[in-house]
Image: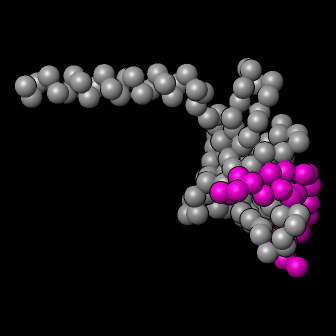
Amino acid sequence: MVQSINTKVDLVMDATAFTGLTDYGKIMIGDQGFEFYNSRDPRKFIQIPWEEVDYVIASVMFKGKWIPRYAIETKKNGTFIFSSKEPKKVLRVIREYVNPDHMVRSLSFFDVIKRAFKSIGKKNNGMKGRR
């Protein structure tokens, strides 16, 4: 059995971790960090201390009515993507431990497309001077 890093637990909820394949289990948010435990394989777990969290990125749709997934970007180990039954409740609890300035929305589909067209335009303008 894995030893939890938390001494006080604020929230436990069913969740899905997107780590290559989808892993189903439970997330535990407490005073020391964010934890995910796989329900089938106890060796598959993710423990992220609050000091290691750089950003929390939420995918927001329909003007905040629906949050399908959220990601926790760490300082050293990359980004971990999760979804849960009640993501708003999860993000509210995370906000108690992470600076609210480090909780951001991800880009929407149209923002990504707009950014791509702008970068193509910049590349073409740079090439005109070389011809």
Q: Is residue 131 left or right of residue 67?
A: left
The residue closer to the viewer here, 103 or 20, is 20
Q: Is residue 14 left or right of residue 118?
A: right
- Identify the image's colour scheme: rainbow, by chain, secondary structure or one colour: one colour
Residue 4 makes an appearance in the image: yes
Q: Is residue 2 magenta?
A: yes
Which residue is at a point 63% across and 48% down the rendered structure image?
55
Give the quarter of the figure containing the N terminus.
Answer: bottom right
Question: Which is the main secondary structure of the residues drawn in magenta?
Answer: strand
Q: Could you tell me which residue is drawn at 84 percent across and 77 percent down?
A: 2
Q: Residue furthest front?
A: 21
- Give the total number of marks visible in the rendering: 0
Where's residue 39, x and y in %? 88, 64
x, y percent for residue 83: 78, 45
Determine which quarter of the picture holds residue 53. bottom right
In this orientation, does residue 53 appear?
A: no
Q: Quadrant of residue 61?
A: top right
- Residue 15 at what x, y percent from top left? 84, 51
Quadrant occupied by the C terminus: top left
- Tell me which residue sits at (90%, 51%) in the image: 14
Q: Is residue 72 above or below residue 8?
A: above
| Side of 94 relative to 39 (left or right) | left
| x and y percentages locating residue 113 in the rendered image | 49, 24
Q: Residue at x 77, y 69 (%)?
A: 44
The magenta-colored residue range is 1-29
Q: Which quadrant of the view contains residue 108?
A: top right
Q: Is 35 located above or below residue 120 in the figure?
A: below
Q: Is-magenta flag for residue 86?
A: no
